[in-house]
Amino acid sequence: MAERKGTAKVDFLKKIEKEIQQKWDTERVFEVNASNLEKQTSKGKYFVTFPYPYMNGRLHLGHTFSLSKCEFAVGYQRLKGKCCLFPFGLHCTGMPIKACADKLKREIELYGCPPDFPDEEEEEEETSVKTEDIIIKDKAKGKKSKAAAKAGSSKYQWGIMKSLGLSDEEIVKFSEAEHWLDYFPPLAIQDLKRMGLKVDWRRSFITTDVNPYYDSFVRWQFLTLKKKKKKKK
């Protein structure tokens, strides 16, 4: 593979990118308030959302591919003069984070901290370890392949975390599910800002009852559906 000769052009483009993104941030270009009623009435309004990415790891190229559709759509509507709102949620509820934290706890209990895992020959003799214990089953198509991709070549959760560039001292903290909520969402927002996403970041949020506002909204939603007899249980 040929070595890269120079990065002057790339560095120049990155400099421009950083300056423009700083300008957007200073001028609060993508912040939209309900008080802009006159503009909404005269020019129209546009709202775009994106399925909350799950926060058990860093964002990847697949997210970028899907996000580009939202990004181009909201950018086009802004050019037409519409009042555009693009909020962003980060998904932290469900079992995967809890399962990963519990796996780390088990590995620490069984193999120490940092863990001293058995070599491959010893592991082949251990027939009690099943694949289902490594990758969580999900009926939805594609979920298993996503889990496998995140797991990489490592059979252990500790190894998966190592592949993210984390030190042993940092990995221990992930044995508590709450730490995942503190660690990955800020990194996701950092990456999305570098991408230049046209998001009103005042309206970003995480799920779970750690966020009382979102939790209250979900409760209200389900109680309303129940009151209207739209749900049975």
Image (cartoon, rainbow, N blue to C red):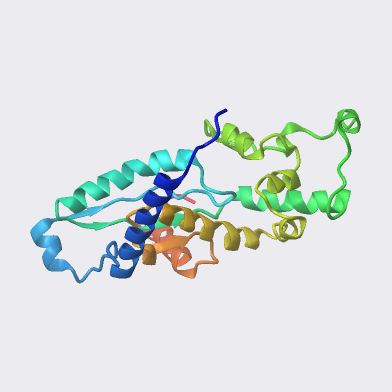
Residue drawn at the location 29% of the way across and 61% of the way down: 30
Which is nearer the eye, 25 or 89? Answer: 25
The answer to which of 138 and 58 lies nearer the viewer is 58
**Can you name the residue that lies furthest to the bottom here?**
35
Q: Is residue 139 left or right of residue 9?
A: right
- Would you say residue 202 is visible in this rendering? yes
Residue 230: tell me if it is visible: no
Residue nearer the viewer, 186 or 108? 186
Residue with the most extreme left position? 42
**Which of the 4 image quadrants contains residue 20?**
bottom left
> At 38% across and 48% down in the image, what residue appears?
50
Percent x, y of residue 116:
88, 46
Which quadrant holds residue 119?
Answer: top right
Residue 159 in percent (x, y) is at: 74, 44
Residue 11: percent from the left, percent from the top? 43, 50
Q: Is residue 13 above or below residue 128?
A: below
> Number of numbered discs present?
0
Which is nearer the eye, 52 or 80? 80
Q: Is residue 1 left or right of residue 212?
A: right
Q: Residue furthest front?
A: 5
Locate residue 201, reporting x and y percent: 38, 63
Q: Is residue 186 left or right of residue 79?
A: right
Query: Which picture quadrant has residue 150?
Result: top right
Classify the position of the N terminus by image quarter.
top right
Above or below residue 208? Residue 76 is above
